[in-house]
Amino acid sequence: MSDKTIEFIEKGRRLDGRKLDELRPIKIEVGVLKRANGSCYMESGGNKVMAAVYGPREVHPRRMEDATKAIVRCRYNMASFSVEDRKRPGPDRRSVEISKVSREAIEPIIIKEHFPRSAIDIFIEILQADAGTRTAGINAASVALADAGIPMRGLVSACATGKVGGHIVLDLMKEEDNYGEADVPIAMDVQNDKVTLLQMDGRLTQDEFKQALELARKGCKEIYEMQRQALIAKYTV
Ligand code: CDP
């Protein structure tokens, strides 16, 4: 929290000229890695993210197998060059947490029962970070899963909402994330209207929270449409 928030919105526009309910520009490329079963490169504002899916494949170590369904594993990793101050390579508390919540956000849409005794591995690599990397990673992973041909109930789409300078805004950029009053990343299975990730850093009143949830629903719908179009573009001959 900081006095700086006051300058973050002027005449209904944000620092980068966006309206309060506007997403940053998004670019999605499907099937960019030759050795992965499915992959997706995604840009969302200043975020550059690669997602790769391997599987369904044999489970190693074997003791992790489930005789009734596939297991889903997810690793979120931030490259050391992805942020302003070099990030120490390797897992840390933050990346362990984000790997876990990303898996939990994605897992409900995968029809795991089709692949007993197998593993579906999802790798999310953040090449450039500008706030909202967990939601960008989830969006890319969801497209990569579809690219891998994994049977799914829908697509997961994610974006953050939050409070900046007293306003509820969509898709926080770095400065808004750092100095804003609240950051609320949300992931949804848009087709089935189910929330699969909801975190909150900061404080919102109940009314503000409802407003933020509605705004996230709008953002996720827009992202879902872009994910769908990217997949159609790739697979329509
Ligand atoms: O990226 P996301 O918003 O999902 O997660 P966060 O933990 O709220 O991080 C917000 C932003 O802080 C990241 O997107 C990065 O731009 C930045 N960050 C950083 O500069 N150095 C780190 N070690 C971690 C995050």
Image (tube, rainbow, N blue to C red):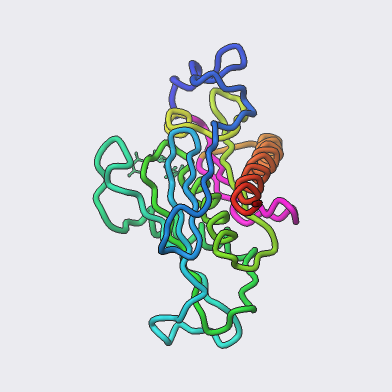
Please report the bounds of the magenta region as a residue range: 180-201
Is residue 97 visible to us here? no
In the displayed orientation, state which residue is furthest to the front.
Answer: 237
In the displayed orientation, state which residue is furthest to the right.
Answer: 192
Observer-nearest residue: 194 or 119? 119
Say if 160 sits above or below 70 in the image.
Answer: above
User: In which quarter of the view is residue 208 placed?
Assistant: top right
Where ligand 1 lies, by quadrant? top left
Q: Could you tell whether 157 is left or right of 49 in the image?
A: right
User: In which quarter of the view is residue 62 placed?
Assistant: bottom left
Q: Position of residue 17 (x, y in %)?
A: 54, 18
Is residue 124 visible to us here? yes
Residue at image position (32%, 56%) is 92
Q: Could you tell whether 215 is left or right of 60 in the image?
A: right
Say if 16 sits above or below 172 in the image.
Answer: above
Q: Position of residue 210 (x, y in %)?
A: 71, 39
Residue at image position (35%, 56%) is 93
Say if 28 sits above or below 147 in the image.
Answer: above
- In reply to whether residue 206 is colored magenta, the answer given is no
Residue at image position (49%, 72%) is 55
- In reply to whether residue 192 is colored magenta, the answer given is yes
Q: Position of residue 107 (x, y in %)?
A: 58, 65
Predominant SS of the magenta segment: strand
Observer-nearest residue: 32 or 188? 32
Q: Could you tell whether 181 is left or right of 85 in the image?
A: right
